[in-house]
Amino acid sequence: MADKPTLDTVFAALADPTRRQILSMLLEDDMAVTDVAEPIDMSLAAVSKHLTILANAGLISQEKRGRVKWCKLEPDALREASVWMQGFGQFEAINLDAFERFLEVELADDPVKDPIEPEQEAG
Amino acid sequence: MADKPTLDTVFAALADPTRRQILSMLLEDDMAVTDVAEPIDMSLAAVSKHLTILANAGLISQEKRGRVKWCKLEPDALREASVWMQGFGQFEAINLDAFERFLEVELADDPVKDPIEPEQEAG
DNA sequence: ATAAAACTCAACCAATTCGTTAAATAACGC
DNA sequence: GCGTTATTTAACGAATTGGTTGAGTTTTAT
């Protein structure tokens, strides 16, 4: 667990086609690393690295049972990024100033957090 | 125009905080390159490169009038990537929920920071 | 105990990214 | 034309990325 998920790491993770392919595969079911790697024309080590990147971005979780590491899609990180993006797509029609304030609040400290959760700032 | 917008280029463009900052700035209004660069602690050349990357991703357009190049937000590319993300499903409802709550708070007549109830078990 | 399976780690390489500064280009304004 | 403003291009460097192979480690099977 190197870094905690940020918009940086989430979008960077999504920028690679192999990693998006992996996410699509995991949409169907949880998979072992080896099974993820099987249809990908790349060394197992490379796929393992991609999975680590996806995990650091919070887009998947990995649970080791026995010698098998199971990979599971975690849509929460995607949701955060989606909120950010849909704002740009839809807000022009509504209120740009409001959306800017929204962004300031959401992105004030980069780590991905629940976008709904109110800031708990007892001052 | 180097390459045409792809999911690769869009997500890669979004992965940089400076570029997201630029997009936020362009929400307010179209801007000249120099004006985009002004609040960014970085050389003009670097900002110019960021704008090129955003343009190649289709996230902004640039129109040169005289010696000034105007930068304009293009939400369509974002929408396309957003559609891809929605393919991952479940988060969409929650996303819209977050959006709704945001609208309630931000666009209320009196934008008081109401403590939002600690919800949300999507079940 | 030994071998195989399921990974990860380390070392390496090529290509790309993100920034710099300095020079080049293009359009004003006089 | 000459200097200034607006912006890109070129050359460079440090850091990161995305892949490789080969050697671990841990768990399972015989």
Image: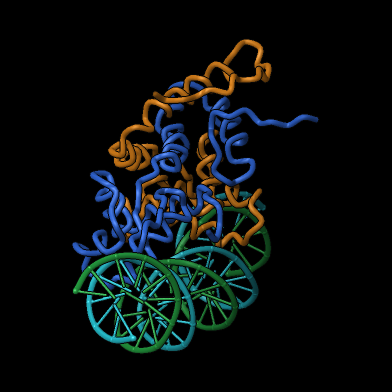
Chain colours: A blue, B orange, C cyan, D green
Q: Is residue B44 visible in this depiction of the protein? A: yes
Q: Is residue B26 left or right of residue B35?
A: left
Image spot of residue D28 (x, y percent) = 29, 65
Query: Which picture quadrant has residue D12?
Result: bottom right
Identify which residue, C19 or A62, lies in the foreground.
Answer: A62
Q: Quadrant of the C terminus of chain A?
A: top right
Q: Is residue B5 visible in this depiction of the protein? A: no
Identify which residue, B111 or B50, lies in the foreground.
Answer: B111
Residue at image position (35%, 53%) is: A71
Residue at image position (45%, 50%) is: A10
From this viewpoint, which residue is outermost toward the right?
A123
Circle count: 0
Residue at image position (36%, 55%) is: B9
Image spot of residue A42 (x, y percent) = 25, 70
Q: Is residue B34 above or below residue A108?
A: below
Query: Which picture quadrant has residue D17?
Result: bottom left
Query: Which picture quadrant has residue A13?
Result: bottom left
Q: Is residue A53 left or right of residue B84?
A: right
Identify which residue, D26 or B51, lies in the foreground.
Answer: D26
Image spot of residue B43 (x, y percent) = 62, 62
From this viewpoint, which residue is outermost toward the top?
B109
Residue at image position (33%, 40%) is: B85
Image spot of residue B112 (x, y percent) = 68, 16
